[in-house]
Image (cartoon, rainbow, N blue to C red):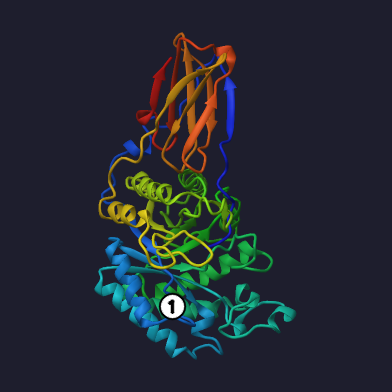
Amino acid sequence: MLKRLGAPAVALVVMLSGLVWASPAGSTGIFAAAQAPSPPLGGVNIDATPGPGATAAGADREIEQARELHAKVVRIEIPWAVFEPRQQGQLSQTALAYTDQLTSDATAAGLKVIMFIDGTPCWASSAPAPVLSGCVPEAGGQAHAWPPTDPADYASFVAFLAQRYASSLAAIEIWNEPDQANQVYFDGPNKPQQYAALLRSAYTAVKLVNPNLPVLAGSLVGSNGVFLRALYAAGIKGYYDGLAVHFYTLTLAALRAMHEVQLANGDDKPMWLDEFGWTSCYPQHKIQEEQGCVTPQIQARNLSDMFRSLARTPYVSSVVSFKLQDTSGEQFGVLSYAGKRKPAFSALASVLASPFGAPSPVTLALRRHGRSVVASGSGPVGDYMQLEAFKGGLLRYHALFTLDRFDRYSITLPSVLGTRGLRVRVYQYWAGIGRAAQKRI
């Protein structure tokens, strides 16, 4: 889990108009698109990571809980520095035994595993000498965030995993969030070029030992496309089978925007949304990990709506929520820190078992307030909303806006429109006009 931009409050871009307003392309929306042959591979991130405190019993428990959620895939971190702490080829037998147990459990439960591999060992790190001097094997630290001096060292370890766990894997994800500005995960200069070199080396090595295993590039948090365009310029095309993305804010809009960047660069590889979620920390907190806190009930509804919104999206191959269980400092899990099931657990289990279905509808109420009309209601999470006000059969006003953290909105229409003879329509861009709410006053 990374620090990300928080969910915005309701933001408006409004305009009065005597012109025809162009509806978004495909006005029936993604929801009404032709049904994909099967929904994306659905699952959950788990904390079953080799390292201090990890036990076989803990791995057993997390896999069993994922099975009870009807997950098809779990995503785990494989910290390279824990597996090869001292030198190349000298593998931690403890870390191997734990991962063997985890993958065996997953296979027995009918689950596949996405492994993302990060954390450079001290002996391989390209960190500058002052940083490297404080590097402690297996203990973490800033030197582990720097890419390896030789990408082939990383590639060799990734290929080892691809071969050893071949039958258990859904995909191998190359590193974690190299575009993060906080430097916690991928540090140093020339990040796009450094990451591209790492990806090319790892992809080539994996395909030599396991040609059919998907290799995921990116692991990106930014949806403006800047880092992805830089990766294209650095030569990543042809060296990945899917693009991993981690979008927590306006998830659907971010997916759409990133897909447009892909298409503009001649890229039709599917996206793997293998991190997204909401923290149920409201009302104790307002912000957590730079995300707006929501209630447990909103967390549950949002998870259900997101999976249903994406069930028919042909360019998304996997949807993996963050995460199974809360930690002491964050509440993104569907289980509490003490292991108690939150409302999100049953919601996620239900939607993973039966992903096709309608997300929450857009609602709309109109009321007069002085010389203006106030439009208010709610909608499904994840994308921009559009309000259109018609008078005399003509579109006179439209507003592009986002929902608040509780998926609600309230917009006061300009008083020049009056308070009578109005028809108002509100819809989510992703779902389209076909699922709009409409009222007259």
Q: Is residue 176 left or right of residue 60?
A: right
At x 47% / y 54%, what residue is drawn?
A: 280
Looking at the picture, tell me which residue is in the foreground, 183 or 173. 183
Looking at the picture, tell me which residue is in the foreground, 37 or 287. 287
Total marks drawn? 1
Q: Secondary structure at mark 1?
A: helix
Task: Sort mark 1 into few (<14), some (14-19) or many (20+) by Cα contacts within 10 Å.
Answer: many
Q: Is residue 64 left or right of residue 283?
A: left
Q: Is residue 52 left or right of residue 358?
A: right
Give x and y (percent) for residue 354.
25, 51
At x 25% / y 68%, what residue is drawn?
A: 110
Looking at the picture, tell me which residue is in the foreground, 126 or 99. 99
Seen from this angle, which residue lies furthest front?
284
Give x and y (percent) for residue 338.
41, 68
Give x and y (percent) for residue 88.
53, 88
| 47 lies above or below 217 | below
Residue 164 in view, yes or no: no
| 71 lies above or below 127 | above
Residue holding disc 1: 159
Q: Is residue 198 left or right of residue 100?
A: right
Q: Quadrant of the C terminus?
A: top left
| 422 lies above or below 331 | above
Residue 113, image quadrant:
bottom left
Give x and y (percent) for residue 20.
50, 17
Residue 378 in view, yes or no: yes
| 103 lies above or below 215 | below
Question: In the rendered structure, which amino acid carries the disc numbered 1?
Answer: Ala
